[in-house]
Amino acid sequence: MASKRFQITWKTILLPALGLLAFFLYLYLFNVDIPTIIATAQRIDLTIYSLAIVAVIFDTFFFALSWRSLLNFLSVKLSVVKSFLYVWFGIFMDIVIPAESVSGEISRIYLVTREQNGTSGKVVASLVAHRLMGMSIYIVSLFASLFILLTKGQSNGMVFNLTLFIIVTTTIFLVLLIFLCVKEKWTLKIIDVAIRFVEYVGRGRWKLVSVREEVVKAARMFHNSMKQFGRAPKNLFTSLFFQVLSWLFSIGVSYLVFLSIGSPLHWSVIILTCSLVAAVKAIPLGVPFEAGLPEITMSTLYIMLGVQPDISATATILIRILTVWLRFFIGFAVQQWLGIKAITGANSKIAMPKMEKA
């Protein structure tokens, strides 16, 4: 994956491009005035919008620090720079591959275990713990923003029902993940059933005895790591602190974008919208929620909560330029860099024995 250089082709940008197309089709169907959107975008304050770009970088940086603190606690030593780069690579994979909730995490597991063999269980534990904290933050944010909107009398009935549904759904998945973290026998049973199913599909052609042993070993390492987290709440608090900072910068991106077009929006509306989108993407079902759906969801929610359609559409486009396209190109640059480093590293290992022989 990262050992090969990745070339941008039409297939690479197909998913995000289809997302934009779907969003503009949505604007057309609902008679949103495109020229007004363009006129609104033209009055953007570039200084404030530049601060939103900075917020995107800090959001990713603190997110990486949060994950790194969990890894380091499990004795998987990763530098700040590498954790930052690996998170960018994961973001790139999330955008390119339509499985937002899992593809980036799988790529980070690969990158770390390629460098530090035998740590897959610990890396998975760090990612699961990180996801659990993120889902908890989203649930709290949804409750807080919904409460503020209700006290101000600004809540829309449909938005209220949608928010409650997302809170309940996210909470259910949160509880299920916690049970899987606690119940080692459940995890081993799921692994056994999955491997038996694969062997059945292969009609006996695939002998997965060694695979089973490796997966079971990683699962036991995972559960041991989760038990270590349970005995070290201080470390979890450090990671949570960094993740909260990351979340604040993430919310700040949307706030600064609205501010840059001269239409500041109340924090409760921004937090509710950001939390709904983030909570859906955090549900671990591999849902392709990065193309079209976030734009339509965000724009619709803003309109339901009192934002003018042209302002809503303009802000959504400007936000997604930063949260998708800016991240896409930074992630692509990181992927290229990691690919070059992997190739040059492999070549140096091949050349070293020859030098010694000479």
Image (cartoon, grey):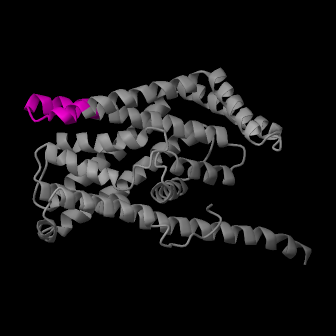
Q: Can residue 151 be found in the magenta stretch?
A: yes
Query: Which residue reaches farthest left?
Result: 153
Residue 301 placement, left or right of 264: right
Q: Is residue 217 above or below residue 349?
A: above
- Name the dominant secondary structure of the magenta segment: helix
Q: Name the residue located 26 percent from the left edge and 62 percent from the top edge.
A: 24
Q: Which residues are magenta?
A: 142-161
Q: Is residue 258 left or right of residue 339?
A: left
Q: How many numbered discs?
A: 0
Q: Residue at x 16, y 32 (%)?
A: 157
Between residues 79 and 203, which one lies in front from this camera angle? Answer: 203
- Which quarter of the rendering shows the C terminus? bottom right
- The location of residue 228, given as percent across then percent down, is 59, 28
Q: From the viewer's perspective, is 33 left or right of 294?
A: left
In the rendered view of the protein, which quadrant contains the N terminus?
A: bottom right
**Does 96 appear in magenta?**
no
Quarter location, residue 49:
bottom left
